[in-house]
Amino acid sequence: KNEVEQSPQNLTAQEGEFITINCSYSVGISALHWLQQHPGGGIVSLFMLSSGKKKHGRLIATINIQEKHSSLHITASHPRDSAVYICAVRNPNFGNEKLTFGTGTRLTIIP
Amino acid sequence: EAQVTQNPRYLITVTGKKLTVTCSQNMNHEYMSWYRQDPGLGLRQIYYSMNVEVTDKGDVPEGYKVSRKEKRNFPLILESPSPNQTSLYFCASSSRGYQPQHFGDGTRLSIL
């Protein structure tokens, strides 16, 4: 079993829909990251959080440490949100700031 | 502009021909790391560096070498590339202390 599991693997939605992507992890962590990878391949860090909730524009990330679960929400989705969203956790038992990644959720927003 | 720069972006080469992928960051970050991304496996760490002259293995270091002689540069060296090293490679950097990692644009390597 992977240490970081994301669901769904693929998600197709209509423009304007509310999107939720889930991430569950099985190890203790010091922080959780949400990353966005566009079709061109580049990776951008969206959020880093260790508790509670963060919001940036139409994106909201939440984390429940006790349940080892995080969600990424997109409100009023737009075709430009189409990308692969990757959850990654930082394990506090390693000294190296290492990230362990989920395999990503491919989001497609149809106009 | 703060950035992590990788070169080349694309490379097709043959088995056994030594190659180097360069990575440079202009943010004075202490921490740098190399990852490879393969379908169905996600990103996996190859090597990392906590600071100049301090490097260590990640999860999949076999067949790779790195060096950190200067703070800004962290090249990835494939001494004798093999087809199973065909992959998409990312360099990343960050400050210490639970800061977001900044990623380069990726290098797509094809080893024939």
Image (tube, coloured by chain):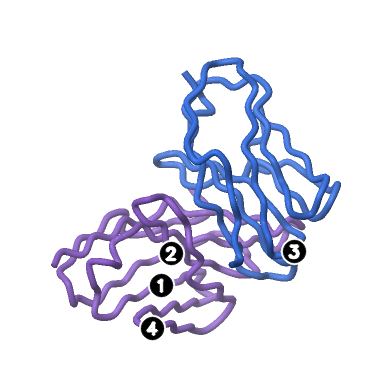
Chain colours: A purple, B blue
Residue with the mark numbered 3: B28
For the residues labelled 4 and 2, say whether their Cβ atoms are less than 8 Å apart: no
Q: Amino acid at mark 3?
A: Asn
Q: Is residue B19 above or below residue A89?
A: above
Q: Residues within 10 Å of mark 1 (few under 14, many from 20)?
A: many
Q: What element does badge 4 sit on?
A: loop
**Which chain is home to disc 3?**
B
Residue A16 placed where, x, y %? Answer: 18, 77
Q: Which residue is mark 4?
A: A57
Q: Is residue B62 above or below residue B45?
A: above
Q: Which residue is mark 1?
A: A71
Q: Which mark is residue A53?
A: none
**Pointer 2 residue:** A23
State which tag comes first along the sequence, 4 or 2.
2
- Give neighbour class at mark 2: few <14, some 14-19, many 20+ (Cα, 10 Å): many
Q: CA distance from mark 2 to mark 3?
A: 32 Å
Q: CA distance from mark 4 to mark 1?
A: 16 Å
Q: Tell me the quarter of the image containing the N terminus of chain B.
A: bottom right
Q: Marks 1 and 3, Cα distance to the nearest angstrom?
A: 32 Å
Q: Are the numbered discs 4 and 1 placed on the same chain, yes or no?
A: yes
Do residues under tags 2 and 1 come within 8 Å of each other at their CB atoms? yes
Label pair 4/3, CB-CB below 8 angstroms: no
Instruction: Indicate left or right for B70 with A30 as reference.
Output: right
Q: Residue B65's spot in the image, x, y percent?
A: 72, 33
Neighbour class for label 3 at 10 Å: few (<14), some, many (≥20)?
few
